[in-house]
Image (tube, rainbow, N blue to C red):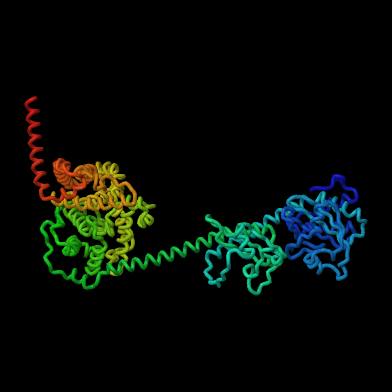
Amino acid sequence: MATRKSRRKSVQNSDPGKILDLVMSLSEDNCAPLIVKQNNYLKEECNAEFVIQIIVNTERMEAYIEAIGSTLLQRKYNIQMPLKLIETLKSSGDQTDLLNNFETDFQTILAPYFPKDSSKKRLVLYPVIDKPFSVIVCVVAPKTSEDAVPVIIRECFLFTWPTLKKAISLEHECSLKQKCQQLLKVAKRLFTQDDKYSERRFPMDIGIAGEVIKTGGLINAKSAKEHPNYDPLIDGLPGIDCKTILCFPIREQTGIIGVGQLINKIGDPYFDAMDEEMALAFSVYCGICIIHSVVYQKIQEAHIRNTLAIELVMYHMKVGDAEVNRLTQCTGFHSHPHLTSLHFNPRALSLRELPCYVMKIFVDLGFEKKFNIKSQKLARFILYAKKGYRDVPYHNWLHAFNVTQWAYAALVNFKLVQQGYLTELQALMYLVAGLVHDLDHRGTTNSFHIQGQTTLAALYSSESSVMERHHLAQAMCILNTEGCDILESLPRKDYDRAILMLRDYILATDLSNYFKNLSEYKSISQDYLKGNRAHVSCLQALLMNAADLSDQLKDWASVKKTAASVLTEFFKQGDVEKSRGDLPLLMMDREKCFIPQLEIQFMQTTCVPLFETLGRIIPKATVCVKIIESHIERWEAAKPIFAEVPATAGLSVLMSQELDNLIEINLKEMEKLRLEAEAANEETT
């Protein structure tokens, strides 16, 4: 407490016993009861009609009253802080004035407690100065001498102010907490309320709201109409007399996105500092709510666009009943003798026959009956999958059939279910995954989409395996299409397992996942345990990769065609990458790619380790390694042939009829050199 230096902090005019009794009685935590007790003491000691205490926030120059004389008010009343009260605080001494010279709001609050003829009563004002709160004590019509009144007040507050100050601070904190709780309730309604309101539009540069937008600062207009920026068009509501306005900015990271207005505080003449703090805090929730609404609206719009796009795609992919009936009722001869071979070349079949052979594969394995798959539903699913593949050089419907056929051949030749390697559900999903694993492939790699920041990359790059996740999404789209859910009859638990298996099978075809896990696969293959969950997951991934790369197990003529198809895709991607200013990988660059070396590297680093690892788990798979090694030998023999022409002519050489003859000549020459080398070694030994 600050007092004038001329006054000593001692009791001069007061009864120490009465002051002690007063101090001992101040046991409440709330301000108002403490103020009443102080008022009663001062009224008696000053022989006054009334005593009033005005609590002042000195930092904000805002004032309020909680009690009048011995009467507790129902609530705290804010009052205007006129020049008279400000001067009293600055003077640090007592002031005298008449009641009718005070502001109207102050007189209105006091009126019910004063006689009608009290307007000319004399008031002695004395400030008790502190931070952040001070008190102005108003003694009404004291009969004690005017010199004694300030002394009595000073001596009273010398001992009682610490208690009152603590109560004021506590009340302030409690009020702040209560308002924060109210704020949270309002914020909750903001996020859940879905009422419709009328919209009014205004220019951004008019009124108090426009000034807030311009400056970014809060404006507390305690007399709204006197504010220089006040504009009734925007600052208020129709039919409401705007007296006070608290206008605050609503922000987010990019800047101001809105303005909030509070108009006419109920029960008080103005908005105080706490209201300002609450408004700024509330503006944060408003900003979040607005952004939430905008994002939600965009999500809804995106969902609608996505739904329309899916409907459009499915319309163009639509499979009619006539197509389904033709497939289910087909009486053609679809019994190629080598269909179950691991080295079967699908190019031996016509494209129009492939759906029939897929139907045959499901039926031959008994999946149709085992999983209660209706033939109409299976046929529709197969035809939708067929239409889901684009007309790209390699990752097309023929490739999907090839992978499905090899999965079928593996199930039959390796007896994967009978030998306990896979359950029947795992076998079913192995086939399904083969059919859908490259749906909507665009003939481009994951890195192409990530580097090019394509739409697919935006959707899936955060999860890695961009294209594989897109294939999975397309597969789920077909499964969710009416009349296509071949898994519908599964119990819920098995259905969930089946979808997870489908996900894992498809993601396994991302070779980056294969290389990342290869060392683990090799380790597991050394001591494979049937039924071990991790070991089975490893085997499923290896089987899926083997089916996906099974083109390398065909005859040499088919291997060449596969290489030409893959390279055509690669070179087209490389051309696009060059056009957008990117540097393509060597294997994507038609001007630099040396085809035989690329094929040898692929087979040695990818295919051989794959089938060697698979062969350690399933011994019958080891034969695949020998086939790949024979192809590597032919690619080695092709090196001198490709070396004689520019890299840009590589594809033409690959598909030329003379290539095989030249390779045979080189193979014989290589064999001759090998025999001569062996003979030379025998002579030296």
Decide: is 587 above or below 62. above
Quadrant where the C terminus sits is top left
Taking the image as shown, residue 625 lies to the left or right of residue 507, namely: left
| Occupied quadrant, residue 345 | bottom left
- The residue sitting at 74% across, 65% down in the picture is 74
- The residue sitting at 10% across, 47% down in the picture is 660
- x, y percent for residue 490: 29, 63
- x, y percent for residue 98: 87, 63
Q: Which residue is at the front of the view, 447 or 283?
A: 447
> Extreme bottom residue here?
239
Q: Which residue is at the front of the view, 389 or 180?
A: 389
Is residue 650 among what the camera can see? Answer: yes
Q: Which residue is at the front of the view, 31 or 145?
A: 145
- x, y percent for residue 562: 19, 52
Taking the image as shown, residue 289 lies to the left or right of residue 428, namely: right
Taking the image as shown, residue 386 lies to the left or right of residue 222, namely: left
Is residue 559 among what the camera can see? Answer: no
